[in-house]
Image: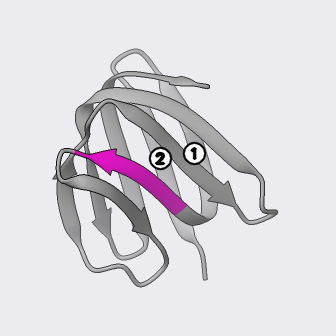
Amino acid sequence: MALTVSIVSAAAEVWSGEASQVIARTTEGEIGILTGHEPMLAVLAEGQVRVTDATGTVHKVDAEDGFLSVDHDRVEIVARNAKLA
C-alpha cells in the first residue's frame, strides 16, 4: 500500500503521485508520514518537504506558508509558495 501525495502552490501543482514516505517541517517540528498514519492537520513551517516515491527516489520541494493534511493514506500539502528543489 502507498501514500497518495499532492503538493500544490498558489500557482500550480508542484508534485503528485504515490509515495512510501513523506517528511515535512511543521510549526511543531519535523514529521514523518508512512502508510496508516493517523489523520492530522498541521501548519507548515518554511522548509523542505521530502517525498520518497515507490522506486526510492527522493523528491525535494521547498515550501512555505501552508498546511499539511493526512487522511486515509492521502497526504495533501498546500503552500503559498512551493517549488521543486
Tag on residue 6? Answer: 2
- When asked about the image quadrant of residue 77, the answer is top left
When the figure is inspected, residue 70 is found, relative to residue 66, above or below; the finding is below
Mark 1 lies on a secondary structure that is: strand
- Seen from the viewer's position, the closer of residues 62 and 10 is 62
Residue 12: x %, y % from top left? 46, 21
Residue 74: x %, y % from top left? 41, 65
Residue that sits furthest to the right in the current view: 55
Q: Does residue 38 appear to the left or right of 34 in the view shown? A: left
When the figure is inspected, residue 22 is found, relative to residue 78, above or below; the finding is below
- Seen from the viewer's position, the closer of residues 80 and 4 is 80
Kind of residue indicated by mark 2: Ser
Magenta-colored segment: predominant secondary structure = strand
Circles 2 and 1: CB distance less than 8 Å? yes
Kind of residue indicated by mark 1: Ser
Which residue lies at the image location 26% right of the left edge and 36% below the top edge?
45
Q: Residues within 10 Å of mark 2 (few under 14, many from 20)?
A: some
Q: How many numbered discs sit on the rendered protein?
A: 2
Which residue lies at the image location 31% right of the left edge and 64% below the top edge?
70
Question: To which residue does mark 1 refer?
Answer: 16
Q: What span is colored magenta in the figure?
A: 22-26
Which badge, 2 or 1, comes first in the chain's sequence?
2
